[in-house]
Amino acid sequence: MLLPVLPRVAPAIAFAACCVLTPGVSNAQIHLWSHPLLGIKPPPCQIELSDGSQITLPQFRSDNAVLLYFWNTSSELGLMGLPKIDAIAQRFSDRRIRFLAVNTGDDLDEANRSYEEFRLSIPTAVDPSGDLRRLLSVPFLPSILMIDKGGIVQVADYGLHRDLNSTLGGKIEAVLAGQSLAAESLRRIRDESTRIYVLPPGDDAYTVRKLSEDKYQYHHRTLVDSYKKLGKRNARWDTDAIAFLDETAKSFASKVDRKTDEALESIGKTLMDRDCDDPVVRYAYAVMLYRNNRDKHARPKAITIIEQSHGDFSVLGYPTHLKLAAARMLWNFYRDQDNKKQYNAKKAKRYLDRCWHQSLEAIPIDDPESHQSRVIAENVLGFFSELPPGLRGNYFFTANKMKDLSPWLVNLIGGQMHLDKAWQARGNGWASEVTPEGWKGFEDHLQRAENCLRRAWKACPERPHAATEMITVAMAGGTDADEGVDFWFRQATEAQFDYWPAYAKWLHAMRPRWGGSHNEMLEFGQQCAATGRCDGDVPYTLCDAVIRIMRDRHNPVGERYIQKPGVYQAVRNVCNQYLDEAQNNETLQDWQRSNMKHWWRSMWLAFAYHAGQYQEARRLLELIEFKPHDDPFGKFPLDADQVIFAVMSRTGPRKNQIAEAVAAIQSKQYSAAVEKLEAVLQNDDLYPLVADRLESLQVALTWRVALDQSDHGTEISLLPSDDRVLGWEKVSGEWIRRPSGAIRGISQTTGMIARCQVDFGPRWELSGEIVHGSSPYAAWDAGIFLYDSNEVTHAVLFNPTERWVAVGPMDDLDDHQKPFKPKNNEVPFVIRMNDGVVNVWLDYRRVVKDKQLEEWNPAESHFIAIGAKYHYADAVLNFRDLRIRSWKPFDAQE
């Protein structure tokens, strides 16, 4: 974000929910949850056991207490809790209580597969439709309902925490002893009816503004004072060099009164023109040159200077922090194997070794009692986070020898390493894909991470890092019930009110898959907005929360969440607050004020677009001169041209005629739509981009009309007839038409994708040739994408470097890879689609046969797109001879 600073998120105070003996539930978090059945009998219900038999709840209870454990495979904590509940059941196997695990929302095969993997001893049930869950009012997963032998719901908990065995065991003992836990819980709920997440900070709160000043003091010492003491001083540049280094210190510290990188580069250049050969001055200039990166020659030139300065730093005795910072830049530059022009294995190894040793030298230098020293600590932590996972254990083993000298930093490194190993053991798939061994490794490393992070926090609670990492541990149930997500969030924000990672981790922890809810995320964001601290990022948390909810797969309305009553108005208010801050904050420089207004108007524009507030969106577009800021648009993500087209076509003078053409498309009257667009395009009052898009849409529609009217098997060319690549919509990258008629894509950092503007129906066969062209990187995955109305759902991609082909849902494509080695860089292809069943031929070989696409929705439109999701620029792909034909099941072509 282009904000002057980040603000501080206030302590969160949470209250007990539906429990008596312990104060906590979800992800070791304390929630207030007044369950509607608490203290009364549940309604009559049928339960379907895993063996297919049916039983009523009273029949299952049979004069015993009953504990129902609701879970599904989309809930990380739900799966983790299965063996824990089973162990508790075995502990109470000779008592008057029956346990039942209820899978809700999954299909029968998936539920039973999970039951078999965990080899549970307790009875199991299935609720694929979710009817039982709704009947018993279970909004969150995992959840526990405990019913006493009289049929009264005494306990309604949700979530998971480390001491579940003792806390739940205590509740079971109380229920079996006849205690009325429900009555006590309801009393506490009445007394404590509000959960407070965020409190306004006091004047003495430590914030990023204060941290920025502390960091400036540190950088001033390492740059200006080092120059004065060790530098190559000369009257030709001495005064200006000191001023330049002081401004560089402000930039490194992100002070509000800093100059732009461009201005600092220009100042540094004048010093270079005076033949200044001081290493720290040259280093500061090279960093600014590297940051700006205006052309392909700038970074190599900057790296050469940094390399020279790094050598001088070591010889002349400059501070370790400077040596490490320079070495990290050099290592990261030379180790980029995807960039063939800059990759250098020998130099990458050299600077990795120097980073390794210089970071270890820096560890005992860090002083946890000094805010200024955070510069050293975060430099070391930055290097550790960049290390390949396989080297982190060795690094911690070496660093651990200094744990008595630097207990905070060493234990923080250990905690981060064990968190990495926990997730490695678990794997990157969905919870349902994790093996019991994976869960065991996950919990083991989670416990070790908790031990390290707790030691780090105790060594220096004044720094927010350890408490912030503990939010992740608590999210996964790795802490006690009274030290949950809210507790560690409070510790982090008491150390620094506006430490953004704490807010981001809290929001992640509150996703439904971890036992939270979208309502909690929204409420948290609203309380953050209420602080009014627009000198930083705390109010922005509401915007981030809404974006996360819009993109969460557990949100059934998707991007339309912003259209729920009050949501758009809330984020609109936040945007206005930040714009007021940009206008009225006298400490901001003009360039910061301009950037801040541009950023927040673009964020507001993105929300207005999704909310269907097109008139307001148009006003914002005009204020930013139709040039949305890439950063806020990238958070959704949104294509600027797509938004401009949508807004201008709905607010321009021809909006009604355009709406009629769109209605014809939606009703599949494609010939009529072509005619209506032809009439619209006769007018000269269309916004240029709208006219171009409509003409492109008209071309795509003529392809669909030709396909519908053609004889079976007749191929329709999808190549554009002129240089505008009509018929295709640019999603990312640059797209041009070659003289041969082929379509060429040139990647940007967001990739290169062109989407055909018409849906070809459920059965078609697409053919052509994909040619990997020049690239500064190794040839990477490319192919065909399938979009619904907004985003990629599925893909057919192949990777000539890693030698694989994959067909499946875009989010899980790694799980569908199979070997494929192309003959050369020119790969002919045929993709046949039959209502979600795919066959693929590459190099005239069938590489995928009758593959049923997972998560395929036949009711949705699916748009073909071509290209690649690269994350780097200047790679080239060519698509030749693109053709499509209708296809019917009786075709015999192989």
Image (cartoon, rainbow, N blue to C red):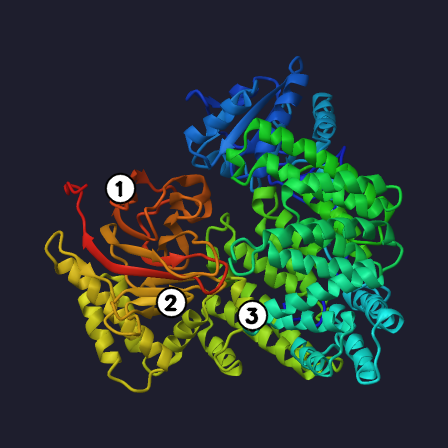
Question: In this view of the protein, which residue sits in the foreground, 100 or 699?
Answer: 699
Asked which secondary structure carries label 1, the reply is strand
Do tag 3 and tag 2 residues touch (Cβ < 8 Å)?
no
Question: In this view of the protein, which residue sits in the foreground, 250 or 454?
Answer: 250
> In percent of the image, x 25 and y 67: which residue is there?
741
- The label shown at residue 811 is none
Above/below status of 694 relative to 114: below
The crowding category of the residue bearing disc 1, from other C-alpha atoms within 10 Å (few below 14, some 14 to 19, many at least 20), is few
> In percent of the image, x 72 and y 32: which residue is there?
181
| Mark 3: amino acid | Met
Above/below status of 732 relative to 157: below
Q: Which residue is mark 3?
A: 603
Q: Residue furthest left?
A: 711
Q: State the image coordinates of residue 180 (x, y, percent, origin top left).
A: 72, 30
Does residue 183 appear in the picture of this structure? no
Distance between mark 2 and mark 1 Cα atoms: 30 Å
Above/below status of 522 relative to 514: below
Pick whichever of labels 1 and 3 is earlier in the sequence: 3
Picture quarter containing residue 593?
bottom right
Do tag 2 and tag 1 residues touch (Cβ < 8 Å)?
no
Distance between mark 1 and mark 3 Cα atoms: 47 Å
> In percent of the image, x 44 and y 56: which residue is there?
869
Pick whichever of labels 2 and 1 is earlier in the sequence: 2
Q: Which residue is mark 2?
A: 730
Q: Which residue is mark 1?
A: 845
Task: Classify the position of the N terminus by image quarter.
Answer: bottom right
Asked which secondary structure carries label 2, the reply is strand
| Mark 2: amino acid | Lys
Q: State the image coordinates of residue 786 (x, y, percent, origin top left).
A: 35, 53
| Mark 1: amino acid | Arg
The crowding category of the residue bearing disc 2, from other C-alpha atoms within 10 Å (few below 14, some 14 to 19, many at least 20), is many
Task: Classify the position of the C terminus by image quarter.
Answer: top left
